[in-house]
Image (spheres, rainbow, N blue to C red):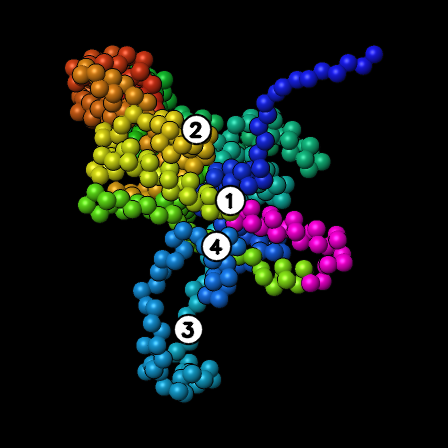
Amino acid sequence: MQRLTQTQRQTLKFSPLQIQMLNLLGLNTLELEQRIKDELEENPVLEEGTETPEQTEENSDGLDEYQPEGSDLPTDDFRDWDEFADDDIPEYKTRSDNFAADEDFYTSPIVQLNTWREELKEQVGTLELTERQRLIADFIVDSLDDDGFLKYDAYNIADDISFTNNIWVEESEIEEILPLIRSLDPPGVAARDLQDCLLLQLERKPHTPENTLSIEVVRRHMHELAGRNYEKIMRVMNLDNDQLKEVLAVIAHLNPKPVVGGQSSSLVVNENILPEYFISNDNGLFEVSLNGRDLPSIRLSKAVVEMAESRNKSDRAAAQFVKSKLASARWFIDALKQREQTMLNTMRAIIEFQKDYFITGDVRQLRPMILKDIADRIGMDISTISRVTSGKYAQTPFGIIHLKDLFTEGVKNDEGEEVSNREIQQAIVEIIEKEDKQSPYTDQQIQELLTEKGYPVARRTVAKYREQLNIPIAKIRREL
């Protein structure tokens, strides 16, 4: 017997526009540019460009067009091209066959950059080796890790070569070629570990008393050297303070890794950060704008829509296709506009909350702030604020900042006021900078000094902040 039951439940459904906007909020400027270009390729109803004045009058509400914030900012200093109409170049110079031989335009040659493995193989090519030995040498070079260390022993390398090239290689053949690889540049390549890497570099240096003594220290007391146990080194090797200082100065100029830069080329290229926001300060009045100069402007293609509507009145499938693409295009344009407005509202709320910091640029002026503080101010969900600030950067008068760094936890000081943990971290940095390097402060001593300054924090909190600042423990910070 069938029974009818009635239940009540609450569900949350997202509209296509909400889904579009949530996906766009998490994108940075470069990702958004690619996303718009992909949409232009996939949706025939969209086209790149802005509307003409006549089209703008017809579309007075602006629903069919998206022009990125900041895209109308001037990028060139010269806008009046009429002043270039009459130039001083003679007419005969405009003919391509009437230039002298010494007036040819110079084209810089294309530079081919080799990786450090290719450079090693080029050095192997200069050695007097048989074809079989060259094969083994190249395989050893390919077996090095990204830092230039050789983590495999001769037995495993011989086994890998035999299996890969279908030839039998003896372990003795590897041991014969390995010293040749270790003699190549950069010094220290194919080292087994840090100690081996330092010894290979020291052995290349001139045999001065300081270098000879440094070799003995690294060979016999690497463990004490890593732990800054200088007293034991001086006691066992009968060294005075000045002699050990000379040894440490020699070791400090060595590379801890044979190869700097890993798999990249010898020219290290620093990736520039592209900020999403531009913030300017005019006597306390802040102006926020988005970085939309490289974003393409898009609009609905009136020609495609009219052509499809006129031809597809009898073709219901084609008409439905155009209708769905038109709705998708309008959703996309609306989502882009909502993204801009949400990002601007969020950034303005952050500036209002952290106004003292944006005026001075001093991290000690940061107030404790969490995502909920900004979400409550603009009436949005915490997840929305997280998407807007995650992976986003802002160009300020004092440099580029990561928005996530503005959100900090709060700690109460002796006066009962909440201060940002960034302020406490800055105090830790100042304490360590002023400490005696021969007897650096421990975490317990730093905690006591912070308490004297009015920051009652626990020792484990000091250790956590010190690790976040990438500051080593007192034993490692010690110097002679």
The stretch in magenta equals 310-333
Identify the mark nearer the N-term, 4 or 2. 4
Query: Marks 1 and 2: in contact by CB < 8 Å?
Result: no
Q: Nearer the viewer, residue 217 or 146?
A: 146
The residue pinned by badge 2 equals: 382
Q: Which residue is drawn at 75% across and 53% down?
A: 316
Q: How far apart are marks 4 and 3 (CA)?
A: 48 Å
**For the point 23% across and 30% down, which residue is it?**
365
The disc labelled 3 sits on which kind of residue? Phe
Mark 2 → mark 1, Cα distance in angstroms: 19 Å
Which numbered tag is attached to residue 335? 1
Q: For mark 3, what is the residue? A: 105
Q: Cα distance, mark 4 to mark 2?
A: 30 Å
> Which residue corresponds to mark 4?
62
Q: Position of residue 120 (x, y in %)?
A: 50, 43
**Is 36 located above or below residue 109 in the figure?**
above
